Image (cartoon, rainbow, N blue to C red):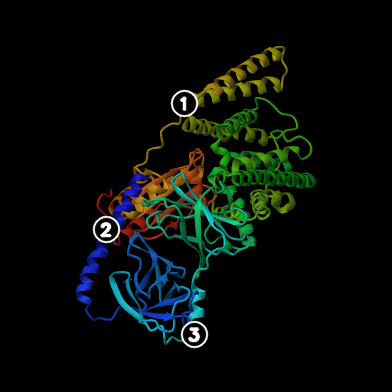
Amino acid sequence: MIEARMLNGLRSLLALLACAVLFASAAFAQGERENSIRAELFAEGAAVAGEEWTLALHFTPVSEEWHGYWRNPGDAGYGMELDWELPAGWEAGEPLYPVPERLVISGLMNHIYEGAYTVLVPVSVPAGADVGDVAAIAVEADYLACTDTICVPQQARLTLDANTIALDPRFDRWRAAIAPLLDREGSFAIANGRLRIAVPVPAELDLGAPHVFIGEPDLVDYTADQAFFRDGDRLIAEIPLGRGTLPATLSGILSFGQGEGVRFTAQPGAVPASGTAFAPGADELPSVWLALLGALLGGLLLNVMPCVFPILSLKALSLARAGGDERAARRDALFYTLGVVLACLALGALLLALRAAGEQIGWAFQLQELAVVVALLVLAAAITANFAGAFELPGLVMRGGKGGASSFGTGLLAAFVATPCTGPFMAAAMGAALLLPVAQALALFAALGVGLALPFLLLGFVPGLRRALPRPGPWMASFRRWMALPMGLTALALVWLLWRMAGAGFALAALGLSAGAVLLLAVLFARRAGKFRVAGALVALAATGTFSVLLSGQSAAPAQASESIHDPRPFSEAALAAARATGQPVFVWFTADWCVTCKVNESAAIEREAVRAAFEEAGVITLVGDWTRRDEEIARFLTDQGAAGVPLYLWYPAGEGAQTLPQVLTPDLLTDLAQQARGSVTDPAPGSD
């Protein structure tokens, strides 16, 4: 954070120095030359004693390439300064501006006006003033006019004869363009290096694509992404801090886009800790039907994603059990689908409830909890032993028993294990689920489950597809034993994950607990009952209890982060802002050790020597966000990007905004991006890497 503020300060200082040089040179050369943005002074009718009188400064660029600035110009430029000549006792108030626009040039944010615009200035006329005999009113205006490449300071002396004034017919239009002031004050606070503002706006107000323009200079990082949350009749905005001093009163404009917005003021006070996430442009989300289709397709594609492979054995056995009995096939398909959909709904409801309570979590959040991973390890070890024939569990998931209990349990397990990563179509749908109302969000989770179960649902109800399956027979016993191999590899992967999350001691204790649990199951449910069953059960139970105690006493000591040939910086919003401020291209990837898709992408497309060489030639700065364990900053950033989980890959061309890359990376995608960036990368700023 300190590094980012220093860089922001240096960036602003350089911008101000550049403006000063431009001002001096332009003032010398300008002479009688016409301003690039012409200024005119108008009045809203004649002044009335004891009332407020409104003057208008109307600005018109000589061509469309020129733009003017808001009162807080952003990272560069400077705001307008006015020096009024008014009768004694008359007082000019704070200028009132329209809603500005954003313009990013070389990584610098500018708050600008394109085209003609008008600034209104209220003037207090004292009671008893002789408004019929007023000397000419004048103002010296200093302001800045810029194109995308040059800036020219402007100076204008504007006069107005208060005794011969006619109401300009454009005043109504000018006043309508001014952002209206909210009738209630908001509140603001600082938390975790971010400015949090609660702006009182009605819950039913269409916010469009919100953005907060802060009036106080340098208080926030202008180029950083802003996060928004709904809390009833309040909109909560979170903005990373800049280098400015915290004011006693905050003011600014909440923009809705397209020139619409409201002015607000805020006092220090309590800001709600949570709310419903609202991404910029959330009111323009694709229709719910498109999101449902995306969730359905995403769930269907999970059947072929790498993170689903460990449970393919369960599905294969489930299909083979259906055999030629049409009634049994339909029953199993329905119960399997019911299990999958209920599991997805349960995970989705828990996710939404935790987020509503203020938790910064996303999809696959359950795999960030050690207890859940340990439970999965025990389950995977038990399934492996069951497939290998060490024991049978009558009527439960692994045996197929009578009725739909087996298929229902298989569906529950399949959904729970199959959803740690997101894939194509699913990413947008799950991101929308975090922004939609609860009922619609749960419908998306249900659609995801239907998509995951769809192949089995079709096999249960389409006889032609079932006839394509091998006939049930003795081969199934051998196939089942072979399926112990991928499940065993899954168990080993979970041991590795626990080592990454909590250290070697914790992983060994969890492995011992799993072995004790498998031994206990083998003794209790062995095919042949022996006279030593009770003694064996007691030994297994003692071993399980011992390792449980050891596990509870282990302190988590995560292994060091995986090394990368790119030597990336750890992700933080401050680190991202600092990297973007250098003017070099930036690549950010978000990963987790439990995300198989992430690891496949890293092996096939990121951790390649060709990519490293291309990145070095193009001066690409790399950052990695490791979401293996909970990280509120990463979770919040993912939400801001409309992503429900990992993987997420962002490419920032030099001086431009983020490009979201596909969730399945091709080997040449990153090298192509780096090669495209080579011709546009400028020399890095002083002090950059």
Return the mark for residue 504. 1
Frontmost residue, 98 versus 384: 98
Q: Closer to the N terminus: mark 1 or mark 2?
A: 2
Mark in the foreground, 1 or 2: 2
Seen in the picture, residue 250 relative to 24 is either above or below; the reply is: above
Q: Closer to the N terminus: mark 3 or mark 1?
A: 3
Residue 146: which quarter of the image?
bottom left
**Dot 2 amino acid type:** Leu
Q: Closer to the N terminus: mark 3 or mark 2?
A: 2
Q: Which residue is mark 2?
A: 14
Instruction: Look at 38% across and 53% down and name the residue there.
Output: 670
Q: Which residue is mark 3?
A: 169
Frontmost residue, 40 versus 545: 40
- Tell which residue pokes out farthest to the front in this image: 128
Frontmost residue, 135 versus 485: 135
Residue 55: which quarter of the image?
bottom left
Tag 1: Cα neighbours inside 10 Å, few (<14), some, or many (≥20)?
A: some
Task: State the image coordinates of residue 566 (x, y, percent, origin top left).
Answer: 34, 44
